[in-house]
Amino acid sequence: MICTSSGEYVVAVTGEDKAIRVFELRRDGSLMQISERLMPKRPCAIALTPDDKTILCGDKFGDVYSLPLLGEPFVEGPASSELKIDNSNGKAEEHALVFPAASSRTVHTKKNQEALRNQQRQIRQKKEKKILNFEHQLLLGHVSLLTDLAYVSICERTSPFGHRRDYIITSDRDEHIRVSRGMPQAHIVEGYCQGHTEFISKICIPQTHHQLLVSGGGDNYLLVWDWLRGNLHHRIDIGEQINYLEAEYRKSMARATDGSVSEQPAVDGREQTLAVSGIWSSPDGRIIVTCEGVPALIMFSIDENMVVGACDYIPTKSNVIDLTILSDLGIAIYSMDTDHEPFSTTQPSSEESRSSRKLFGSLNLSNPTGGSMGAEGPYIQDLVGKLNARMQTDGQRGSRLYCYNLENLRKRGYEEEP
């Protein structure tokens, strides 16, 4: 989900029906849907151009499309199997589908029956395939699963070419960060940023330094890039500190249960692997990072000289799922998973533990290490309180599939035979 800079429109992606929906945000806070467009593959990342007129959509197949923000509502089009393109004149002509003459009554062997089922399945898929009958343009493609994208404009002062230029930055499962030119030259690749050894799940352009890029994924570290030149600017190791936070949490739980401290193994073997689930930038140069199954916010700053500061680790009550920054108030509001135990993506929490934890929390960016909600003032306390009260009316537990799916991107190696 993403919002225009004016706050007038909200763009949302739903993976179940592969739809991109645009909503108008009314004055009373309600949303009115103004368009719905179904993509050929499941969208996984969206971005807006700086003028808020174009949506960039990346899908699981590795392609990036551009669509106008205020496109026409989706209208059912004819099935692609009913149309045939005549290359001589470019016109669409109807043609009949060719069905196999054989049937289950005439085919008896197991191999031939399987072949018949495959033919029938392919015909059904052709009949169900729809033509994209709304304005769109294919910009670029990856040969691997695309995970995130960003659109950035470099002004004349910082551009090495002496004039303004737009770029599309994309990341994929195969540890690649690709820098392509903006529209309409998105097919031109300017360079790559290579330094990750595992999948890349998130990339972020700091609001105060558009020439830098922060990336994270399946590695135990974050990388800060000078992406215009493809050079690594800084590396931030986060695995050791998160393991320390987990060890301290387990010690405190052991003291609470039997009064003794015992060394317990980490759940799910998570001390070896991390998966960055989100990277956000604030207007004052702060970068906030979250990881799957980690009840903490990782925060560092980048000063005016592009020097990366030390990391602060702010513990939370539960695993952090998502976050948004309210720039005008200097506040970050984050959602948490109360269905699983902290530092776990599989172990369900007890009913007692779940009822005592909140679904939302807030962080004062002007005093990030100075505590929790009490420092933000009555307005934020009331806002977070209303969010928690509204969400706790639904007693159904969430699904691990929707909360934690980044580990599926990790490649599984095979053990060598002795």
Image (cartoon, rainbow, N blue to C red):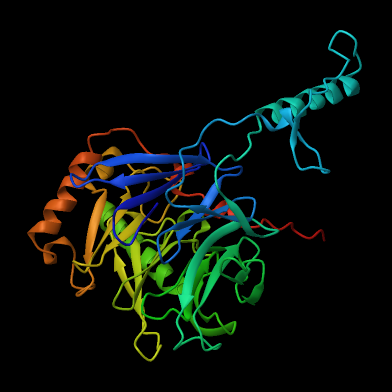
Q: Which quadrant of the view contains residue 129?
A: top right
What's the residue at 64%, 77% (across, down)?
A: 191
Q: Is residue 213 visible?
A: yes
Query: Left or right of 221: which side holds 287?
Result: left
What's the residue at 29%, 42% (across, down)?
A: 31
Considering depth in this image, is 286 or 400 the residue closer to the camera? 286
Where does the C terminus fall, quadrant-wise?
bottom right
Residue 133 image point, x, y percent: 58, 39
Query: Left or right of 239: which side holds 170?
Result: right
What's the residue at 35%, 36% (across, down)?
A: 397
Residue 187 image point, x, y percent: 66, 66
Residue extending farthest to the left is: 378
Considering depth in this image, is 73 or 229 the residue closer to the camera? 73
Considering depth in this image, is 248 or 65 the residue closer to the camera? 65
Residue 327 image point, x, y percent: 25, 67
What's the residue at 41%, 88% (across, down)?
A: 306
Q: Which quadrant of the view contains residue 379?
A: bottom left
Residue extending farthest to the bottom is: 305
